[in-house]
Structure formats: structure tokens, C-alpha cells
Image: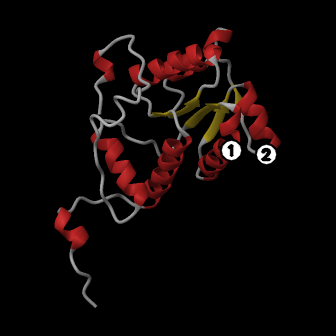
Amino acid sequence: MFPFNKFPGVDTILGPEMKSTGEVMGIDDYFGLAYAKAQLSSGMRLPKTGRAFISVRDDDKAAAAFIARRLYRIGFQIVATVGTARSFEERGIPTELVNKVQDGSPHIGDQVKNGEIAIVINTPEDARSQADSYAIRRYALDYQVPYFTTMAGADAAADAIEYLMQREFEVKPLQEYEAPKLP
């Protein structure tokens, strides 16, 4: 866990040298709940409802559509920038279009700032989208909105949200997870 909120202006993307530092752990019988616990232990509570902003590079659009469909099915509204929105609409996923930060207000940063976005999934592709992506990550961090920069992380978050909607997680001693099961 990194206290990025204490470092104004710092980018929240971790380089290879930092990816193995500051880990947190969640444990549960279900991966989704374990992931939700890990997120909570790092100070991020996953939403159960709201609007999910998704803007991803072309290589991630198929995986992002799968995640968007899952989130939509459990009640989230999907918000995306033009390329991602077009991809989702082609796949039958209702999507609201929003401007990129670089396209001017009203843009996704405004919606994050106004509390209109519950979760952010963003994977930039080129130098131009990197700058926009940086602004989106800073908005999400500054306004405490969970954000994911990989499809694996976004998929884990969707899994966690689905489990959280079905049940609350419980806290129990570590020994109970490895205790022999009685017949």
C-alpha cells in the first residue's frame, strides 16, 4: 500500500521496482471476498452500486467488455470514452459517453470530482492517452474512487463486488482457514 494521497502530483502507476513493495493481504474461502478484504486493508472500499468508468487500450477492449457486462448485469451504469464506448455498444452493452480530460469539460475528471463515478478502470495506450490517464488516476486518488490499471485487477474487482453483493465477509483467525474439515 502506498500513501499516494500524501504526494500531490505523483503518478500512481508503479514501476517494476515498486510492484513488490507495500503489499496487503486478504484471505477468505472465496477469491472475490479475499480481494475485497485486501482492497479494504489498503484503504479502498469497493462500491456495490454506481457508475463504472471504463477507458481501455484496444488490446484490452474484449476483456473490458466482459467486465463491463458483469458490472452492468449487477446494476452498475457503464460510462466510457468514445473508443471504448463504441466497442461496448457493438457488443450490446449500454454505455454513456463521456469526454476525455484532454477534450475539455464536461469530462471524466469532472464526474469523478462530483462524486458521480464509483469505480475507474483505465489502461492507456499511447503517449497522448498516458497524459489523460495520469489526470484520471489523480482525480480517482484525490476523491477516493477505486481505480484499476490492469484487466486482471479490474476482473478481480468485479469478482469482489459480485461477492460483496451476495454476502458480507467475515473476519476469523488464520488458523480456521487451514483447520481440518470435520465430516
In this view, 168 is above or below 48 = below
Amino acid type, callout 1: Ala
Q: Residues within 10 Å of mark 1 (few under 14, many from 20)?
A: many
Q: In the rendered view of the protein, which quadrant contains the N terminus? A: top left
Mark 2 lies on residue: 91
Q: Give amino acid for label 2.
A: Arg
Foreground of the two, 21 or 97: 21
Identified at 35% across, 66% down, the residue is 29
Query: What kind of element bears circle 2?
Result: loop
Q: Earlier in the sequence, mark 2 or mark 1?
A: 1
- Secondary structure beneath disc 1? helix
Figure quadrant of residue 133: top right
Locate residue 16: give its quadrant: top left
Q: Going by the image, does 147 lie left or right of 90?
A: left
Picture layout, residue 37 above or below residue 179 = above
Viewer-side residue, 13 vs 4: 13
Q: Are marks 2 and 1 in contact (CB under 8 Å)?
A: yes
The label shown at residue 65 is 1
Query: Residue, x 28% and y 91% (percent of image)?
Result: 183
Residue 40 placement, left or right of 102: left
Residue farthest toward the right in the current orientation of the protein: 90
Q: Which residue lies at the image location 45% right of the left edge and 52% below the top edge?
A: 160
Q: Is residue 119 above or below residue 75?
A: above
Residues under labels 2 and 1: Cα distance? Answer: 7 Å
- Disc 2: CA contacts within 10 A as few (<14), some (14-19) or many (>=20): few
Q: Nearer the viewer, residue 112 or 177?
A: 177
* Residue 153 rendering spot, x and y as whole percentages: 48, 43
The picture places residue 130, in percent across and down from the top left corner, at: 57, 18
Residue 42 badge = none
Task: Name the image quarter holding residue 172.
Answer: bottom left
Horizontal and vertical percent position of residue 22: 27, 35
Q: Is residue 137 left or right of residue 55?
A: left
